[in-house]
Every structure is written in C-alpha cells, then in structure tokens.
Image: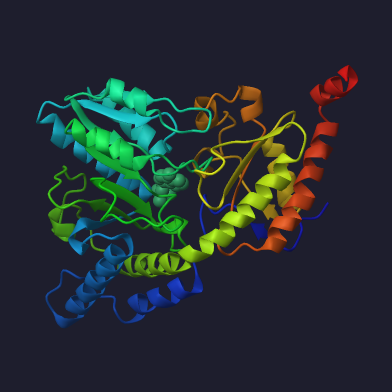
Amino acid sequence: MSIQEKRIYVDNAATTPVSDEVVKAMMPCFTELWGNPSSLHADGQSAKAVVDEARERIAKAIGCTPSEIYFTSCGSESDNWAIKGAALRMSKKGRNHIITSKIEHPAVLRTCEALEKQGFTVTYLGVDEDGIVSLEELKNVISDKTALVSIMYANNEVGTIQPIEEITEIAHKYGALMFTDAVQAVGNIDINLGELAVDMLALSGHKIHAPKGIGALFIRKGVVIESLIHGGGQESRKRAGTENLPYIVGLAKALELAKAELPDMKRVEALRDKLIEGLTAVPYSKLNGHRTKRLPGNVNVGFEYIEGESMLLWLDIAGICASTGSACSSASLDPSHVLLAMGVPHEKAHGSVRLSLSHENTEEDVDYIIEQLPAIVGKLRDMSPMWEDLIKQK
Ligand code: PLP
C-alpha cells in the first residue's frame, strides 16, 4: 500500500510547523540585523534593540515584566536551569528536598534524578487515574526542608492540566519555590503571570510554531537561582551565550500569534471532543487523561488488543501523523511512564495513541481520522491471537 499523499498532521505536542509569519519576522535578522547585541557600535545596538523589543513583546503576551524573561536554547534547558538553579541556591538555606510528579517530562525527571545523585532528596508525587497530582500527598510530604516544587502545567502525553494555583499556594506556605514546566500549555491556554503566582515557568518555541532551539525561562523578580551557563554578561549576567537573535524574534512573533489565536482554541476544543467521541465509540477503547481538564488539542485513547506502534505505521500509510506518547521516548518500546503512573496496566498502555491538534486542523481532518482509525484498529485486531481468543470466548 502506498503512503497517502494528503498528510494530516496531528502530532503538534511533538513539534509544530514554523508559521510563515514567523519565518518572515526572522528573515531580517539573517540579512540586516546580524550584529552582536553586546557590541557598542551602531550595528550591535540595533541588534540589542531587537532583542529588547522581543523580550517586551513576550513579557506582554504572558503578563510579566521584560526583566523576568531569560532566553534559553529550549524547554529542556529551561527545565534544567529552573530545577538545578533553585536546588543549588536553596540548599544554602538548608533546603535539600525537591517535590515533583511521576508524570513529568524526562527533562524534569532526569534532572531530578541527577540531583538525587548529588545528595538531594526527591519525592515523586503520584497521580490519580486522570493524571492529576494529589494535593493531599503534596501536603503530607512538603516541609520546611523543601527547596522546590516542580509540577508541569499540562502533560505532554495525556494533556491533563494540573491545579497549579493550589499547588503554588501550598509550596509558598512552606517557603518553597514553585516552578512549572508550561512547555505544552503556553500558546494553548491563556497564561497570565500577573495572576499565577509561580516563581518560575518554562516555555519552548517549537511547540508554538516557532523554530526548534529557542526557549525561555520566566524567573519572578526577587527570586534568585544559581546560573548553569557561565561566560559573558548576557541575560542580566545569568545565562551566558550570544543571543540567538533570529530565533528570539521568531519566538516573540509566535507567542503573539498564539495569543491572538487563543479564541480559536474553542473551535480546536470542539474538534478534540468530536474526535474523542468518534474514537471512544470503538469497542474496548478508553480515553486517557481527564475528560475536561485537558489541553484543547489533546486526544489520547487506549485500544485494547493492539500495539500502538503498529497503529502508527498504518496511520502513517493513511496520511495521518500521530504518536504513541512522547516524541522523546518514541525510540523506546517501554510503555509510557505517564500511563503507568495513572494505573493503566502494561498491556493497555501499549495500545495507546496520541493525536494532538492545533488551530491549523479542520473538521475535515477530524472526519477523516474518525473514518480511518477505527478501521485500522479492526484490521490489527483481526491479526491478534488475543482478540481471536476473546471472540471465541464470546
Ligand atoms: N517539557 C515538556 C512538557 C515537553 O513536552 C517538552 C518537549 O516535548 C519539553 C519539556 C522539552 O522541550 P524542548 O524540546 O524545547 O527541549
């Protein structure tokens, strides 16, 4: 069977296509505005003005001040900096305990594991069957030795949105810093740092139609963390490295566009719900993640008696680009750590597929997926000896 020519991209949680307007905004930084923002001559100062303006636009989009935005190379770097930087700083005050959850992205989990090797104690909070962190467990484990609470805003696999405000309140009651990895949330949900009291927040460009290789860390005024990248005096002497001018401009443009598109997320949410309804109509299927407290574009459904990977190949042939979970762990055939933490049994976790929509998706896309995917599930089940046994038993 040949691969379908028309492609439907529903893997936006892995990465997004760079939008034309973002490319257009970046172009002058390659041709005219290529100076080093640290240079004192006019060419350098023009470049500096571009970085300053981008920082202002990003701050405006998420409700903070420009001096609270620090550019990084990606979401993973922002996560590493927030967690290691806070841990190192707070350990000077005798706080050596970190609280995170079992369903975080590897950029958070592996960072916490690295800190455990350096003597920090880490508590990995469990989640309920919808993927929501237990506030009761948090209250039981937090103490005046806790340096940092690091809980993601929204999960990259199942889309579940966490009660970040309540978690922040608990963290602050014990004098701990609060960090949220909002890589999947920014651009999909309205984030206003004037109202959300977190101390730090990570975001990444390639999830919001900017290029890969640019991210930012919000650090609230007055919050001090250690630096990880030492060198020149860029980013207020906190993160060295000559500024990635074109990508910084691309990030600012993408964030502004995403903010302007937010009202359209209601339409995306309706597409998501139609897709959930269509796919969970398949017998022996189940929605993974919370039904309503989820990202507007996230659909994650488990189908019993099939392997998610085989389904992806057939979906690809049908022109549908989807994923079984996190792009970062797609090289491994281990079941998703997120689904396991939610109590999904191994065999069911293996049969899950994630479809992540963006504002570029249409009703036509959704109708096509609802037509194709159940047929693929049926085809794969027909090849499964376990399915055959089930049919015989019936
Ligand atoms: N955090 C979450 C929740 C993510 O989904 C991702 C990427 O998939 C990252 C962090 C890492 O971001 P980046 O790819 O920019 O390093």
What percent of the width, then of the height, locates residue 338?
50, 32
User: Which corner quadrant holds the C terminus?
Assistant: top right
What percent of the width, then of the height, locates residue 235?
18, 58
Task: Describe residue 324's horizontal placement relative to residue 387 as left or right.
Answer: left
Q: Residue at x 55, y 37 (%)?
A: 289
What percent of the width, then of the height, locates residue 198?
26, 45
Q: Residue at x 22, y 22 (%)?
A: 119
Residue 246 versus residue 156 in the image, above or below: below
Task: Describe residue 324's horizontal placement relative to residue 306 as left or right.
Answer: left
Q: Is residue 198 visible?
A: yes
Q: Residue at x 67, y 36 (%)?
A: 308
Task: Describe residue 182's horizontal placement relative to residue 274 as left or right.
Answer: left
Q: Is residue 321 visible?
A: no
Q: Residue at x 61, y 40 (%)?
A: 324
Residues 196 and 151: in front is 196
Tally of numbered tags: 0
Q: How is the image coloured?
A: rainbow
Residues 261 and 356: in front is 261
Which residue sits furthest left?
93
What percent of the width, then of the height, locates residue 184?
44, 49
Residue 230 versus residue 135 in the image, above or below: below
Residue 196 versus residue 23 in the image, above or below: above
Picture quadrant where residue 145 is located = top left
